[in-house]
Image: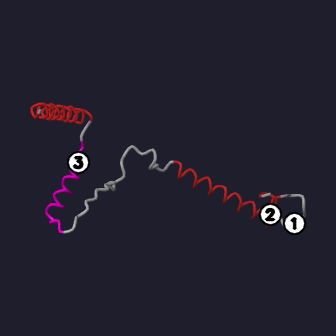
Amino acid sequence: FFFSFLSWNHKGDNNRKMAKLSTLILVVVWAIAAISASAFAPSRAFSSRKPSALGVSIKVEVGEGEPLESALRRFKREVNKSGHLMDLRHKRYFENSQEKRKRKIVQARNRKRLERMQKRRMQNRT
């Protein structure tokens, strides 16, 4: 058992027992301090903010004999579709909740407008 060295039944040196007891107390206090320090540290799992490094995994494969300009154009298109640059642009300055709500409403309005235009184009083709 872990506390067997603290038994007071056998005869021994009191100083040695007190040293062991103080060592045990020191270990327990250190363990409690370590646990409490990690308990109050911000956790990544429950964090509301995204990590600072963007988790971007955009890959463009360049074919044999394909010009670099076309591969670069495809890469830019993929970056724009991912939306990371737009998020960075909005996070450049502080945006309160009211401004954010207004921006989202305008984005939704533009998205609906674009969808209506594309729907009309598809109807006109047939």
| Residue 118 picture location, percent across and down | 14, 35
Q: Is residue 50 left or right of residue 88?
A: right
In the picture shown, does residue 43 fall above or below 101? Answer: below
Look at discs 3 and 1 and give the one toward the viewer: 3
Residue 111, located in which quarter of the rendered image? top left
| Residue 93 picture location, percent across and down | 22, 46
Q: Main secondary structure of the magenta part?
A: helix
Crowd tier of the residue under label 1, counting other residues whose Cα lies within 10 Å: few below 14, some 14–19, many 20 or above: few
Is residue 79 located in the magenta-colored stretch of the structure?
Answer: yes
- Mark 3 secondary-structure assignment: helix
Q: Amino acid at mark 2?
A: Lys
- Mark 2 secondary-structure assignment: helix
Q: Amino acid at mark 3?
A: Lys
Which image quadrant: the N terminus? Answer: bottom right
The numbered mark, 2 or 1, whose residue comes first in the sequence reads 1
| Residue 30 picture location, percent across and down | 62, 58
Q: Is residue 26 left or right of residue 64?
A: right
Give the total number of marks visible in the rendering. Answer: 3
The numbered mark, 3 or 2, whose residue comes first in the sequence reads 2
Q: Which mark is residue 17?
A: 2
Q: Which residue is mark 3?
A: 81
Q: Amino acid at mark 1?
A: Gly
In the picture shown, does residue 83 fall above or below 113? Answer: below
Is label 2 in contact with label 1 (beta carbons under 8 Å)? Answer: yes
Q: Which residue is mark 1?
A: 12
Crowd tier of the residue under label 2, counting other residues whose Cα lies within 10 Å: few below 14, some 14–19, many 20 or above: some
The residue under the point 36% across, 46% down is 49
Q: Which mark is residue 27?
A: none
Image: magenta residue range: 65-94
